[in-house]
Each structure stands twice: as structure tokens, then as C-alpha cells.
Amino acid sequence: MHILLIRDERVLLSLRRSGDGFDHRWHMPSGKLEADESVAAAVVREAAEEVGVDIDPADLRLFHVAHVTAPGYDSRLGLFFRAQDWRGEPFNREPDKCYALQWFPLNQLPTDLIEYSALGLAALNSAAPYSESGWPGR
């Protein structure tokens, strides 16, 4: 799940800290489902864990689904949710996984944005609810 927080035409992105090819690249706050957890509950939990904001599940809007794969990585089905509202000021709650948080204008995204996040952000201005990336012929 990917969490889109937009304020004043700016999107919140996190600079990943990881031991893989995504280190020092920008990404939306995101996470994975835990056992016996609904998707909405996971989005709310991840937002609190990663950036310290509280989101009411009723304020979440699913706006895109992406099925992606890449050599050396498991394929992923990404659900992109926009939080229409939240409580609290975002801050980096996971410095072991994130170097920094930063707000970027939607029309001036960083060049080192992870492609997976770029798919979701591009969907904001598209009527396409689904995309694929990395698959043969795509």
C-alpha cells in the first residue's frame, strides 16, 4: 500500500534508506499487510508508523492499482490510496528506513523518484485505475 498525502499542491515523499538499489531514492510512504489485517487498517497503521499522522479510514480513497515486477525482485500488487484528510504534522518516525521527508510540488517531482511511486503519481491525472510495469511486452 502506498499513502499519498497532498497539501497545497505538494506531495510528501520519503528518501529511502535501504541496502538495495532503492537507497537514496524518493518514494511515497508505504508498507505491507500484516496477518489478519484489512488493507484500510494497514494504510492507517503504516501512516502512523512511518510519518506520524492519524488517518480515519473513511478519509482514504483508492485511486490506482499497479502490478509491477523487476529482475531480482518479487512481483508486487500496489494499492495507491490518497488521504483526503489527516491529523498531525508528518515527521520521520523511521530514521532507520528513511533519511528524510520532503514536500514536492506535484509538477516538480524529483528525478530520482522510484518508478513504482511514479506510476501511482501519474495516475492522479489519468482515468486509468490500473497499470502494469516490468512485465514482458510492457
Image: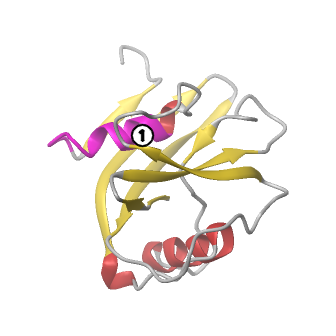
Q: Position of residue 1 (x, y in %)?
A: 49, 59
Residue 102 drawn at (x, y percent): 59, 50
Query: Where residue 112 sits: x, y (%)?
Result: 59, 27
- Asked whether residue 67 is drawn in magenta, I would say no
**To which residue does mark 1 refer?**
67
Q: Amino acid at mark 1?
A: His
Q: Nearer the viewer, residue 35 or 123?
A: 123
Look at 63% across and 76% down and name the residue there. 52
Q: Residue lying furthest left in this view?
A: 127
Q: Residue at x 60, y 60 (%)?
A: 31
Q: Quadrant of residue 46?
A: bottom right
Q: Nearer the viewer, residue 97 or 77?
A: 97
Residue extending furthest toward the front: 8
Instruction: Left or right? Give the position of 80 relative to 13.
Output: left
Quadrant position of the C terminus in the picture: top left
| Colour treatment of the image | secondary structure
Q: As drawn, is 69 to the left or to the right of 67? A: right
Depth check: give the residue in front, 27 or 109.
109
Q: Which residues are magenta?
A: 117-128
User: Element type at marker 1?
Assistant: strand
For residue 58, side relative to residue 51 (left or right): left
Q: Residues within 10 Å of mark 1 (few under 14, many from 20)?
A: some
Q: Looking at the rendering, which quadrant does residue 22 occupy?
A: top right
* Image location of residue 27, percent across then percent down: 57, 44
Above or below — where is 119 with respect to 95? above
Q: How many marks?
A: 1
* Residue beneath the point at 51% across and 77% down: 44
Is residue 119 shown in magenta? yes
* Residue at position x 36%, y 32% in the image: 132
Q: Is residue 50 above or below residue 38?
A: above
State which quadrant residue 107 falls in.
Answer: top left
